[in-house]
Amino acid sequence: MTRKILLAFATAVAACSVAGPAFAGESPYYGFNYLSPSLPNDKCAPYVGRACSGYNNWDQSRLYKNSGGVVRLGFQDTSGGFYFLDFDSSWNGVGEIQLTRGAVGAPSYSRDYCKYQSGNSSYVQCLTYIA
């Protein structure tokens, strides 16, 4: 009997030490594809020209911007408030752009979004990051 309890305990400890957090790291939620006034049309209902992640405790919103006009990158809270910065063509081809929640004052539980803002369509990849 004691062996069975010890075996069950050891198994439980091993399972806890192997299991990590539910999610950690970078996750793409759109692209590489174009952002324009009409694209995407199905990635962030009811908005057109915007892509969104799901709601979570995201730490950063990230963007690769290869070309195009102004792209808005940021966070949206559950009440519909937006926290963002705009990135114009001077950011084309610079690599990964990282925007933290703290930089724009977004709450911890939010969703990441990237959207077409103005100018030419932009070729982008939008990602979210959680530590």
Image: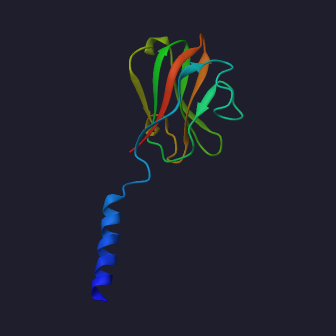
- In this picture, residue 130 sits left or right of residue 86: left
In the rendered view, would you say 10 is above or below 59?
below
Residue 54, x across and y down, in percent: 57, 42
Residue 107, x across and y down, in percent: 52, 45
How many marks the image carries: the answer is: 0
- In this picture, residue 54 sits left or right of residue 93: right
Tell which residue pokes out farthest to the bottom in this image. 1
Q: Quadrant of residue 102?
A: top left
Q: Residue at x 65, y 22 (%)?
A: 39
Residue 32, x across and y down, in percent: 51, 23
In the rendered view, how is the structure colored?
rainbow
Between 84 and 66, the one nearer to me in the picture: 66
Quadrant showing the C terminus: top left
In the rendered view, would you say 127 is above or below 64?
below
In the rendered view, would you say 22 is above or below 31?
below
Residue 115, x across and y down, in percent: 59, 25
In the rendered view, would you say 57 is above or below 96?
below
Quadrant showing the N terminus: bottom left
Between 45 and 100, the one nearer to me in the picture: 45
Q: Residue at x 55, y 15 (%)?
A: 122
Q: Quadrant of residue 121?
A: top right
